Amino acid sequence: MKIVKPCYYKDFKCIAGECPDSCCQGWEVDADSESLAFYNTLDSSLEIKKRIDSVLDKDEFGNTIFTLAPKKRCPFLNSENLCDMHIAIGGEHTPYTCRTFPRFIYDFGSVREIGISFSCPVATDLIYALNSHLTFDVEVNTEPPALNDIDGELYYKLSNSRKDIYNILQSDESIALRLIKMLEYAEKLQSEIDSYEKGNDETDFFGVFINPELINPEWEEKVKNRENRSIENSFFNENIAVYFIYKYFMQAVFDLDVLSKAKMAAVGVLISTYFGNDAWTMHLWSKETEHSQYNMDRYKQLLKNAKCLSTQALIERIKQCQ
């Protein structure tokens, strides 16, 4: 299998209790079936077993979750911001989300793409400090391809198209012009792949960022105190767009929606432009949106249905930020 990772991936290291915004606070964690099976093997007299059983619950989607403690803290997060479950039974037996976060892993048959999410402040610091084009490291191991029903011809087309978009985003033109060219390219590509039903949602552009589930009030203040600025021609803004294309674009092999992925990349740069051109701002947005099922489902719908996020509306907004 071919493994693809961002060039800075090898430099990532969790800082645990020193983290300025713990990933163990602010959102619910699912208890996956493999972890639950292991918890059932624990001696019922163990304190950690009693604690696990006492906080297991079901959410409205039927997922088994751990009930959060006050201030939306994980019930196993101790006063030193370390995980009591990890300490008691080992990190390999914590839930899958905890074992893998902030990594995202996507399998496309013989290709596995791995990255680290902006929702981790260490990850955003790494990409913000990257004063060059974002590139990707590739290695090959002996692991067999993942079982899949991917349309090989579509995958090949999307893979080549993503390379084209990388080239557009990493050109010498202004960031604004690159984003416009990317959106125009994606709209044409979308017409070749599948129809794109545009909606009539009247949500205001800045209303897009007022999420129904508020995780960190600091994000709400960012939106409220937004500023009208020009798009900076920085590597950070370029790499924000490339990050979103890397993370989401190939998902179109499953849902046939390339245009929304390109819009997400453009909006990512606008987030930086309006709310703060720094790593912390992007971290706040990501934790607030990418890692809340409510907020992310809403965001995906708005990318398709909101008039303010149509290709032309985004192009006009980007021109205003030049």
Image (spheres, rainbow, N blue to C red):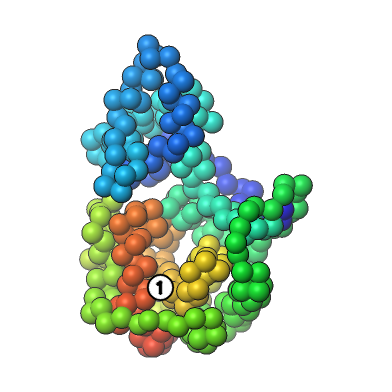
Residue furthest toward the top? 45
Task: Identify which amino acid the numbered label 1 is placed on.
Answer: Val
Choose between 191 and 311: the one closer to the eye. 191
Give the image location of residue 139, x and y in percent: 74, 54
Q: Residues within 10 Å of mark 1 (few under 14, many from 20)?
A: many
Choose between 212 and 251: the one closer to the eye. 251
Q: From the viewer's perspective, tell me whether residue 103 is left or right of residue 10.
A: left
Note whether 308 is above or below 22 in the view shown: below
Residue plotted at (47% across, 74% down): 257
Task: Please name the residue that numbered disc 1 is placed on.
Answer: 267
Q: Quadrant of residue 36?
A: top left
Note whether 237 is above or below 39 in the view shown: below
Give the image location of residue 31, x and y in percent: 40, 37
Element on which disc 1 rests = helix
Note whether 258 is above or below 282 in the view shown: below
Q: From the viewer's perspective, tell me whether residue 162 is left or right of residue 45.
A: right
Choose between 286 and 38: the one closer to the eye. 38
Give the image location of residue 181, x and y in percent: 52, 86
Residue plotted at (33% across, 19% down): 50
Query: Which quadrant of the rendered structure holds the C terminus?
Result: bottom left
Note whether residue 205 is visible. yes
Residue plotted at (35% across, 85% down): 313
